[in-house]
Image (spheres, grey):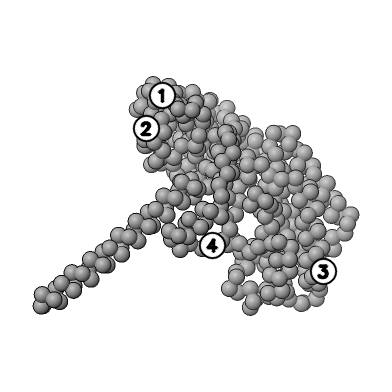
Amino acid sequence: MSELQAALLAIGLGVVLAVYVFGWWKQRQYKRRFAEAFGQGQDDALYGVDQPPIEAQLVNVDALDAELTETVDVPQTRPLDLPLAVEPCVLLDARCDFIIELHLAEPGSAAMLDGLWQRKFDFHKPLYVCGLMVRTDQWERVVAETQTLYSQFRIALQLLDRGGVISAAKVGDFRDLVLGIAKHINADTQIPDMQEAYREAQAFDAFCAEVDQMVGVNLLPPGNRQLGGAKIAEAVALNGMKLESDGAFHLFDTAGHSLMTLTNQDGSPFQHHTLPHIAASGLTLMLDVPRVENPAATFDQMVQVAHTLARDLQVNLVDDHRVSLTDAGLALIRAKIAEVEIRMSENQLIAGSAQARRIFS
């Protein structure tokens, strides 16, 4: 090999290495920004999903999307019910969270909880860490990389969601883990009675199961006529609905929360690239009652959308038994939704609130 060939080979390897290092650095920057914005990992979708306000901390989603796009090529789909509106520390509730307080002998950072960060996904329910800042004497959400100094920590495990109540064994593991960390850092603890907390969570879960209602209105064409995907997309767009990555069309409120969805009745997802080529035998408009604000009023809005789609697509509104939905039938459904809304309010759980969306997830 000549000296020229060796030099060219060395230059080529240097370029490849530089490209690799640059790509690695960009990916790391993307992950760091994504983690800071959305919390750590999928199980933390609520770590913020509705991250409660000590003070509301709103995030400009469009600006975040633009920043991420400059860093790495990511799909530009709208995040569903993006959980960034509020801090979790305010939402902690003894009915649905097992909360342990750590009072530190001396101010410390998130690094003191090293053993917790390593196991935070072991419990299969959201885990929240809040810290009382020494500088401001206010609570904030804590993540592993935080360098802020805290005088206290509140470490909480969410005990229930739509998947039911966590197992008592998992709660015991969580308690033992936190108590072990507290002993290691010489922190005083304030911890609830585990059996009592678990019984309260079971009772609250039973109530949540009673009010956990989904309401559907089916749109079926007469006879064996099929609905073309392009025609469906055109009709729903006129009603302000957008196709999302879950395969359903969504109507969003001004805060970015899904008010209702339109799905293919056979369960197959709608996709942008196949819409012009598919046909559906029917559609279903769905309302997730406990996850929307003012669900009775939202149901009225859904009925209006249903009537508009029925006219534009020339379909009939029917129930799950293919019986036509009359005004009287719709009024009965609305009354039941209003009853759920009242029951939730009486139990200090407001439909469509940050608290409701994290519990009914």
Q: Residue at x 15, y 72 (%)?
A: 7
Q: Distance between the Cα atoms at labels 1 and 2?
A: 10 Å
297 over 92 or under it: above or below: below
Give yes or no for contact between labels 1 and 2 (Cβ–Cβ under 8 Å): yes
Circle 2 packing at 10 Å, graded few (<14), some (14-19), many (20+), is some
Residue at point 56%, 41% (across, down): 57
Q: Work out whether mark 3 precedes mark 4 in sequence or the reverse, and give the earlier one.
A: 4
Query: Considering depth in this image, is 145 or 136 the residue closer to the camera?
Result: 136
Callout 1 secondary element: strand
User: Position of 62 compared to 184: left or right?
Assistant: right
Is 172 on the left-hand or right-hand side of 248? left
Q: From what the image shows, is residue 48 above or below residue 327?
A: above
**Measured Cα–Cα span from mark 4 to mark 1:** 43 Å
In what element is the residue under mark 3? helix
Q: Which residue is mark 1?
A: 104
Q: Which mark is residue 311?
A: 3
Nearer to us of marks 3 and 4 is 4
Mark 3 or mark 1, which has the lower sequence index?
A: 1
**Residue found 70% across the figure and 42% down from its top:** 351
- Residue 92 visible in the picture: no
The local crowd at label 1, few if under 14, some if 14 to 19, many if 20 or more residues have their Cα within 10 Å, is some
Residue placed farthest to the right in the image?
328
Residue under label 2: 112
The quarter of the picture where residue 198 lies is: top right
Q: Which residue is mark 4?
A: 76
Q: Where, quadrant-wise, is the N terminus in this rendering?
A: bottom left
Q: Return the disc, 4 or 2, that comes first in the chain's sequence.
A: 4
